[in-house]
Image (spheres, grey):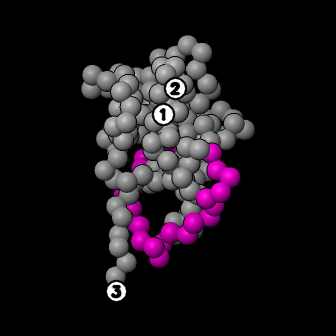
Amino acid sequence: MASEEIRTIMAPLTDSFVVLPNSAVAEVLAFTAPDPLKNSPRWLLGEIAWHGWQVPVISYEQLIDENVGHISTSRARILIIKTLGESTQVNYIGLVIQGLPKLKKITADTLVEKQTEGLADTLFSEVLIESQPALIPELSILTRTVEQAAYDN
């Protein structure tokens, strides 16, 4: 019996990848410095205008690990992801990634779960995909976290 395939986007971070369902990704943009937001945490870089929306831009690496230093922008892009529709103010989130994402079909045979306990709230799981470390975000909690940090709700 063939394994079920999930179509994903693997977007490079500094030391790993972030893995998202293909359907959650709206667009990949060249990096432009976001307009800063007042009193925001270090991981919330600001917001950009995109297709009529104000989109908060984050460093996912800094969000899940406070000890992560400066994120390079020399090869950076902004990955626009769709939220789950639970937020009234955050319909899209921009993630800073390091290079171009790639399409990847994942099966149970190609994915090994590394850790699910003791993770940041916004992180569903740490995995290995064909020996490459990857992070699977918890999108609903990520949306609420970004909304609270950006708009103080």
Q: Label 1 is placed on what type of residue?
A: Arg
> Taking 39 as reference, is 24 left or right?
left
From this viewpoint, is residue 77 visible?
A: no
How far is mark 2 from mark 1, CA to CA? 6 Å
Residue 95 position, x and y percent, is: 47, 37
The residue pinned by badge 3 equals: 1
Task: Say which residue appears at 59% left-offset and 30% top-offset.
Answer: 43
Which circle, 3 or 2, is nearer the viewer? 2
Q: Which is more N-terminal, label 2 or label 3? A: 3
The residue pinned by badge 1 equals: 144
Asked if residue 19 is positioned above or below residue 143 in the image, the reply reads below
> Taking 115 as reference, is 49 left or right?
left
From this viewpoint, is residue 51 visible?
A: yes
Q: Label 1 near label 2: C-beta < 8 Å?
A: yes
Q: Which mark is residue 103?
A: none
Whether the magenta-drawn stretch holds residue 54 is answered as no
Residue 94, quarter of picture: top left
Q: Nearer the viewer, residue 47 or 33?
A: 47
How far is mark 3 from mark 1, CA to CA? 39 Å
Q: Secondary structure at mark 1?
A: helix
Q: Label 2 is placed on what type of residue?
A: Gln
Asked if residue 55 is positioned above or below residue 12 in the image, the reply reads above
The N terminus appears in which quarter of the rendering?
bottom left
Q: Secondary structure at mark 2?
A: helix
Task: Say which residue appears at 36% left-offset and 27% top-offset.
Answer: 88
Whether the magenta-drawn stretch holds residue 109 is answered as yes
Which residues are drawn in magenta?
97-120
Q: Secondary structure at mark 3?
A: loop
> Alpha-carbon neighbours of circle 2 within 10 Å: few (<14), some, or many (≥20)?
some
The residue pinned by badge 2 equals: 148
Task: Say which residue appears at 72% left-offset and 38% top-offset.
Answer: 67
Residue 61 position, x and y percent, is: 60, 41
